[in-house]
Image (cartoon, rainbow, N blue to C red):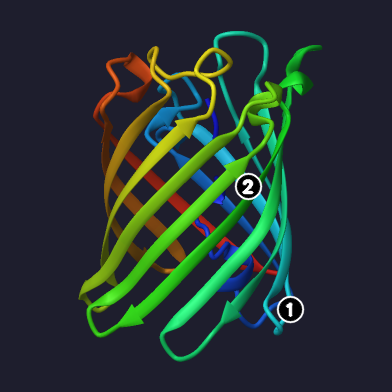
Amino acid sequence: MKKSLLALTTAGLMAVSGAANADWSATVNLASDYTFNGVSQTDNDPALQASLDYSRENGFYAGTWASNVDFGEDTDTEWDFYVGKYYQLDEKFSLDAGIAYYTYHGASHSDDYNYPEAYAKFGYASDLGQTEMNFWYSWDYFGLDVDHYIAMVGHTFTVAEGHDIRISFDRSLSDDDNKWSWDGKNGYNHYRLEYLTSYKGFDFNLALEDTNMDIDTADSRVVFSVSRTFGL
């Protein structure tokens, strides 16, 4: 289970990076699978996702993001909210920090899964590309009163104008595997290799990813997505 943003991947969220000249932007994304750190949130099926973002020149942003999900019961929608601020510390270093709240819908019990999450994302730009160190923390993961951590390192580099490659590694940890675990363990690793490009206003992402878990929703897979962002 679960996403990020929120983004989310995606993290310096699109409120900052997309539609730079507009205070408001909206994005629609169609993906062959909705994976969060390598784990499918849609039972290996496609996802239709959308976001609405507001940003200011001082780096403040806020937004909302939604997707279909399938956890094997009646919960069918994830709807998230986030607010944060992006700091360009100098020519090379940046910081994106904020808080997100994940909500779930579709069944009478779905809101039991709701939870908050704080994040901090550090960026370093050089001639070799963009390097990231990102961290997420929830003190009530999936409403289970358990601490949950994610740490990620990633690097994006350009292979030709308009064509980028991103490599990332992240680890998820539960503070109490009696309350939350993956494949019977308190943590797991996730690896992802992505190709990113754009064409006529559409953004394309082709990713190969895998985890060290032996479950059907977290095995090796190729994920393809196409999105379009509109300034409002």
Give the residue at x 38% y 76%.
124
Choose between 37 and 189: the one closer to the eye: 189
Does the image show residue 161? yes
Tell me the kind of residue under disc 1: Arg
Tell me the kind of residue under disc 2: Ala
Give the residue at x 39% y 51%.
152
Q: Write down the quadrant of residue 167 in the picture.
A: bottom left
Along the horizontal axis of the image, is 79 left or right of 95?
right
In this view, 55 is above or below 107 = below
Q: Position of residue 94 (x, y in %)?
A: 50, 77
In this view, 22 is above or below 196 = below
Could you say which disc has been placed on residue 230 in the image?
A: none
Pointer 2 local density, CA inside 10 Å: few below 14, some 14–19, many at least 20: some
Does the image show residue 106? no
Q: Position of residue 177 (x, y in %)?
A: 50, 18
**Residue occupied by mark 2:** 50
Q: Position of residue 88 (x, y in %)?
A: 55, 83
Along the horizontal axis of the image, is 47 left or right of 194?
right
Along the horizontal axis of the image, is 229 left or right of 91?
right
Choose between 217 and 214: the one closer to the eye: 214
**Residue occupied by mark 1:** 56
Along the horizontal axis of the image, is 54 left or right of 4?
right
- Mark 1 and mark 2 in contact (Cβ < 8 Å)? no
